Every structure is written in structure tokens, then in C-alpha cells.
Amino acid sequence: MSTTVRTRFAPSPTGHLHIGSARTALFNWLLARHTGGTFVLRVEDTDAARNTEASRDAIFSGLKWLGMDWDEGPQVGGDYGPYFQSERNEIYDRYLAQLEASDRAYKDESGATRFRMPDQPITIDDLICGSQTINLKEQGATRWDAKLKKDVAANPDLVIRRADGSYIFHFVNVVDDIDMKITHVIRGEDHLSNTPKHAALFEALGAPLPIFVHIPLNLNADGSKMSKRDQGASITDYIEQGFLPSAVCNYIALLGWSPKDDEEIFSLEKLIKRFELSGINRSNSRFDFKKCLWLNGEHLRRLDADELLQKSTPFLTEKNIPLDDPRLPAALQLIRERAETLDQIPAGIAPIFSADIEIEEKALAKISGRKNITDVLQGLHHSFADQSDWSEENIKASIVATAEKLELKMGALMLPCRIAATGKAGGPDLLPLLVLIGKNIVLDRITQLIAKL
Ligand code: GLU
């Protein structure tokens, strides 16, 4: 009988949801979903001094925003709870008693409880990092004394409970993985060096080892270690900047995992289908914000009209774009061809909905020196005014006719026309944009720009 896969994400609620942690969560979640297994959320909140409720909430809401639901854990419960380590002391006491009963743990002279490090070397096989063998007893027999600047004799046995009764991370982490029947421990490579200790504890508690999967680190673009303040580090920033959760998951997945082909665009469903542990890379990944933006643009273009409206709504509301304007769906279709994030949408379509526009200085500077600029704008005004049907074809015909009359190329008229109508030198496709702005407003704005020159 095959065992059902049980993975877990075990954050310590001491900060925001970091992109590296989100990636750990995603790989655990994807493996569970890919195999029809169970994804457990366990909060490692034994460090009372550093835990905050705000951090816990940011982790929960970040996971939910990304689309990672948990089958067991806070808010949903499960058969192996409680899922906060701070509420599991009785369970830890029970496992400790088991170690004491088999003489694998003892109280030292300070009152702390220590786990007897095994004499034999321990071998761990990590799915990504390979196999390593280490003799923990030998290794712990000395410690570096910073004052004396040399190794001095030390007690190699691992403290698992402090004299004040509080438990140490290594012990509770292992007890929970045993008690919650975790089959795969997928976590950051920074925990690899802890793993031999954990393996010794598993063995002493008579439990089989889970499959260890340590994911290489994710570094900044320049190869430095990513810190909290670096661009792209916090999931909250992605939410605020108008990223789509599917794009962020896509991006995070590719930071450390590759499909067998060169495909790059993945919905969550496709990730679930394609994700396999064998695709996890063996080398560190580097964060690439440009790629993340590009992927977001790709996901934006794949949303259907209703989803696009729904996802854009908070950003539109913030900038007072009227949600009930019948031109809104067409405006959204138009802007999404160029936008990379949702928060770029309101500015791109504002000229359609605002009564007044501001002519950007740098846009104006591009045309104000042209010697025939007034002729161009007057010519366009004249020809546009004659159009009774304000369609893309007719607008284009007006621009072509005006260009011919002035012996200019059509391209030379597009920028002045855009700046007059929108105040900006760039933006969505001009012809459909002019249709949406409306003839009379375009005419008024051309007149206003002529007056300004
Ligand atoms: N609470 C640990 C951390 O946030 C998790 C360790 C683990 O996944 O085993 O780093």
C-alpha cells in the first residue's frame, strides 16, 4: 500500500511572508496537490519574544492570496492538531518522556534536558543535496571559544529543553513531523545543516525518516543574500503593486524548479499537473524582477474580461475611474496589451474618463519645438471635426489626409495627436483610444494644446 503524501509548511511568525518562504510553501503545496496528498500548515511559534500576530496574519493572508489552501492547520483544524507549536506542550512532554525512558535524554547539571548524541555516524540522503555522513558526537565534542580563540571541550549532547522548561526548535520540529505523519520535509537549504541532528532524533524516537528535500537558496540578482528590504522580498509588496497571484506563483515556481521543456507560462492548475520534485534545480536561483513583471503582463493578457475587471477594481476605485462607464470593458482590453501590473491600468486609461488632462512636461518638450506643430494640430482638428462617424477607420483617414496635405508622413502626426488627446507621449494604441475618448473631447483637447504652444 502506498503512503499518502503529507507535506507541511512550518513558518515562524516573526516577519512578513518572504518570497523564499512562499516558494517553500508553494513546493510543499504543489507536491501535495500533484499527488493527491495533504498539505499541512503548522505555525512554529515557540519563540514568544519574536512572534507577532501581525506576522501570523500576513502569512495566512499571503498564502491565501497566492491561492494556497491548507488541508490541515490553523482555521481549518485536522486530526493532528493543535497546529500552533505554542499549544502542543503536552505532546512534546510525551515524546520527551519516551526519550528519557529509553535513556536517550537526561537532565544536565544546569537543569536543561539533553539528547544523547549517537556514537555512530549519521547518514542523511537529501533528494536535492545528496548524501552526507557526519559523526555528531565527534563534531560536538569541542566548541570554538571566541575569547580563548581555540577549540575547547564541550558536551556533544543536544539541548532539547531549556532549564526554564521551554523546548528547542530541533526537538519540536522533529516531534511535529513525526506526530503529524509528514512524509516529505521540503524546506530551504539553510536547514540542511540541522538535518543530521533531526535524523538522530527521528531514529531515537523510533520513527522512519521523511524524505528530505532542501531547496537551494534564492539570491538577489547580484548574487548577494536576499534580505527583507530587497526589492521583491515581501509578498505584501506584490499585492499592493498589482501583481496577479497566478503570475507570482508562476514566477516563484520557476525560481528553483524547471519543467522538462522550456515552457514558462504556468497557471496554478498547470503547475499542479507538471510539478515534480525531480525538476527542482540544484543550484541557487537569482531573483529577476524584470522577469516577474514580464510574467505578470503575460498573465494579465490571459485573464477573461470578467476576471480582468474584478482584479482591476480596487486599483480603478482608488483612482476614481467609474466602474459603471460603458467604455470601461473596452478600455481595459486596450490597456492590458501594454500594462505589466494592475496598478499601471488606471493611469493608462485615465484620459478616457477624466474631464481634464495634464500635459506632461516631457511630452510637451517632444513636440513644442517642431516648426509645423500648429499646422498639424489645426489640420487634425479640422479633419476630425468633419467626421460624423467617429470610428477607427475614419480617424485614420483624417490623419492620413492631413499628413498628405502638409506633405508629412502619417507617423509625424501621431505623437502630437496622442499628446493632445492624453497629455502623454506613450500609452495604448492611439486609434481605439481616440474612439473611446470621444470626438468632442478630442477636439477640445487639440484646441487647448494649440493655445498652450
Ligand atoms: N520554522 C522553520 C523556519 O521558519 C521551519 C523549519 C522547517 O521547515 O523544518 O525556518
Image (cartoon, helix red, strand yellow):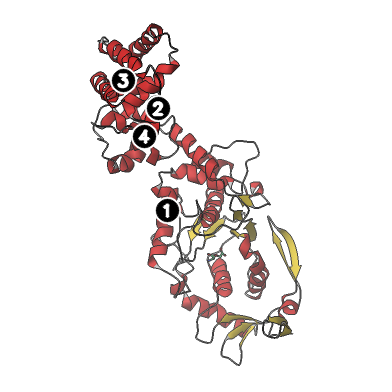
The response on whether ligand 1 sits within 8 Å of label 3 is no
Q: Quadrant of residue 369?
A: top left
Q: Indicate which label's residue lies in the foreground, 3 or 1.
A: 3
Q: Amino acid at mark 4?
A: Glu
Distance of label 3 from label 4 (alpha carbons): 25 Å
Quadrant the C terminus occupies: top left
Position of residue 293 in the picture relative to residue 223 (left or right): left
Image position of 447 with respect to 274: above or below: above
Q: Amino acid at mark 2?
A: Pro
Q: Quick one: SS at disc 2?
A: loop
Distance of label 3 from label 1 (alpha carbons): 37 Å
Q: Amino acid at mark 1?
A: Thr
Q: From the top left corner, tell me how far across and down residue 212 is, in percent.
A: 64, 60
Distance of label 4 from label 1 (alpha carbons): 33 Å
* Residue picked out by circle 2: 428
Closer to the chain start, of discs 2 and 3, is 2
The residue nearer to you, when weighing 239 against 365, is 365
* Residue picked out by circle 4: 361
Position of residue 452 in the picture relative to residue 123 (left or right): left
Res. 236 mark = 1
- The answer to whether the residues at label 4 and label 1 have Cβ atoms under 8 Å apart is no
Q: Residues within 10 Å of mark 2 (few under 14, many from 20)?
A: some
